[in-house]
Amino acid sequence: MPVYPPPALLLAALIVSMSACVTNDQARSQSGECNVYSDQRTRLRAFDPYLLPNLRSTGGGDETAIVFVNCTGSEISYYWIDRDGVERYYGRIEPESDAIQHSFEGHIWVVKTGDGVNLSVFRASRAMSLAFVTPETPRG
């Protein structure tokens, strides 16, 4: 049976998504990247997907939420990596949109292209955070 986040947590995530993530199509076309305005303290670091075989979600962390922001121009999908390293599909995000996902501190998430290519890996933090997904795969 799915576990749903408390309404207050969802509302807070929605407020972060709406107020801190403003996408500007004109700026994106000029700079070639997603022009998103946000508090830098709320951004999750994107990890190289090549680290994925060694990453597992940890348990016992605080309840939190991640706002996945799709800056790729294409549809993407996101998956939770469980404690055994198995990918569990959670949803998809249309281009230039975002999705709020309930999580726990220490959970690992992978984001993939529509063709199933790994783009980025994120680790949920204690604070509700923004995960910006770009077409470039992070290295390092």
Image: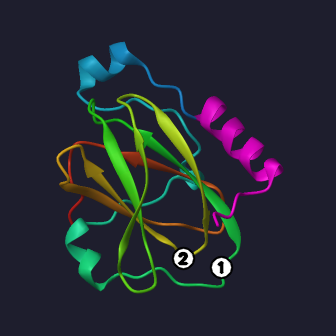
Front-lying residue, 85 or 121: 85
Q: Which quadrant holds the N terminus?
A: bottom right
Question: How far, Cα to Cα, is label 1 from label 2?
Answer: 6 Å
- Please say whether residue 42 is visible from this viewpoint: yes
When asked about the image quadrant of residue 13, the answer is top right
Residue 33: x percent and y percent?
28, 32
Residue 139, by quadrant, is bottom left
Quarter where residue 39 is shown: top right
Q: Magenta region: which residues?
A: 1-20
Residue 4, label in figure: none
Q: Mark 2 points at which residue?
A: 106
Which quadrant holds the C terminus? bottom left
Q: Which residue is found at the position 17% from the left and 46% from the top?
A: 115
Residue lying at the far front in this picture: please name it.
Answer: 1
* Image coords of residue 27 (percent x, y): 35, 19
Question: Is the residue 18 above or below the residue 105 in the image?
Answer: above
Residue at x-position 20% and y-position 53% = 116
Secondary structure of residue under mark 2: loop
User: Which circle's residue, 1 or 2, is located before the other in the chain?
Assistant: 1
* 15 horizontally vs 132: left or right: right
Check disc 2: other Cα within 10 Å, few if <14, some if 14-19, many if 20+. Answer: many
Q: Which amino acid does label 2 sit on?
A: Gly
Relative to 109, does residue 115 appear above or below in the rendering?
Answer: above
**Secondary structure character of the magenta stretch overall:** helix
Residue at x 28% of width, y 75% of height? 52
The amino acid beneath tag 1 is Gly
Judge whether 7 appears above or below 45 on screen: above
> Is residue 17 rendered magenta in the image?
yes
Task: Note whether residue 140 is visible.
Answer: no
Quickly name the residue at label 1.
61
